[in-house]
Image (cartoon, rainbow, N blue to C red):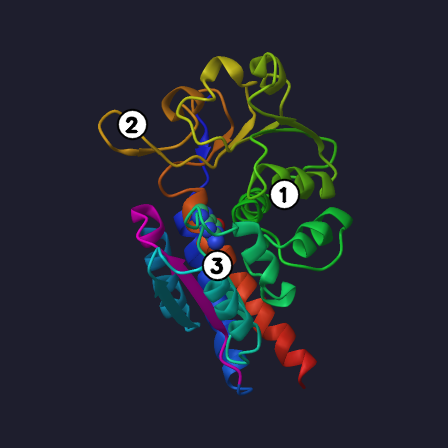
Amino acid sequence: MTASIIDGSALSALLREQVSDRVNALQTRGIKAGLAVILVGDNQASQVYVRNKVKACEQTGIHSVLEKHDATLSEADLLARVHALNHDNSIHGILVQLPLPAHIDAQKVIEAIAPEKDVDGFHVASAGALMTGLPGFWPCTPHGCMKMLEHIGYSLRGKHAVVIGRSNIVGKPMAMMLLQQNATVTVCHSATVDLKAHTLQADVIVAAVGKRNVLTADMVKPGAVVIDVGMNRDDEGKLCGDVDFAGVSQVASYITPVPGGVGPMTITMLLVNTLESAERHAISTA
Ligand code: GUN
């Protein structure tokens, strides 16, 4: 079997057109959707991510404000900035890029963001809303994975999904979203004994570990759907995921590539969340 590729770049382009239309519609009602991005320090990868997020806002007509701060910024000053943005009516989404310098308590900063502007979906209120099925913002990366499954018309009802990785940003919320769609979900992690025994049972596998070749062809049931959240470099410095793409694509029915898979979807879902925040604001102030 040669897997069909789920093209995250193409799906993103489609969804971003829809975002752009809704941004324009909102603007005719006098509301310009706005996102504030805060970057502290000079982490190279974070700079690239943040630049891509701001660029995507520009392309879809979302107003964006990028605040860059020195790595020496105090926690108190960062909290003060977040509080100010919470009360800024031109801003509907606040994103504090992680990781933060070690002297700043990242969780404390995330909890300072007003939940209605938490477009990253990292606040405990957002996590709780996801867990209980209440309205709230979903973390962008797992939400993007769900959109990819939706796009191929894949019904998760009664399917066995295996998530590899248990981070608060991807693994745990991913498991909740799959569960909400009636999949039977197994979460594997670094202490899992015999990962292969689990993945071989899976109809859907989401690899979100941050390590190359976590999933190889011998670990995949023929016809399974494989979503690769990893973002790593191979020996030649080329971008690659957690999945051995060449091998697994001979066994799976669908697979996401790296680059051009989940990555662009993450940013797209950030745009969707920011737009939805602005739309909710419009309803609440109408
Ligand atoms: N660092 C890596 N990914 C993310 C993300 O999705 N949001 C934020 N805020 N920081 C990140």
Q: Which residue is denoted by mark 3 in the rendering? A: 75
Q: Specify the amino acid type for callout 3.
A: Glu
Which stretch appears magenta?
A: 31-47
How dense is the environment of label 1, judged by Cα within 10 Å: few (below 14), some, or many (20 and up)?
many
- Can residue 18 be seen? no
282 up-or-down from 16: above or below: below
Q: Specify the quadrant that holds the C terminus.
A: bottom right
172 up-or-down from 87: above or below: above
Q: Where is residue 86 in the image (x, y as percent from the top left)?
A: 57, 72
Is disc 1 in contact with disc 2, using a CB cutoff of under 8 Å? no
Query: Which mark, residue 43?
Result: none
Q: Which residue is denoted by mark 1 in the rendering? A: 173
Q: Specify the amino acid type for callout 1.
A: Pro
User: Which image quadrant is residue 282 in?
Assistant: bottom right
How dense is the environment of label 3, judged by Cα within 10 Å: few (below 14), some, or many (20 and up)?
some
Classify mark 1: helix, strand or loop.
Answer: helix
Q: Where is residue 158 in the image (x, y as percent from the top left)?
A: 74, 32
How many marks the image carries: the answer is 3
Give the number of the mark in front: 3 or 1: 3
Q: Specify the amino acid type for callout 2.
A: Asp
Of pointers 1 and 2, the one earlier in the residue sequence:
1
User: Which image quadrant is residue 204 in?
Assistant: top right
Mark 1 close to ligand 1, CB under 8 Å: no
Classify mark 2: helix, strand or loop.
Answer: loop
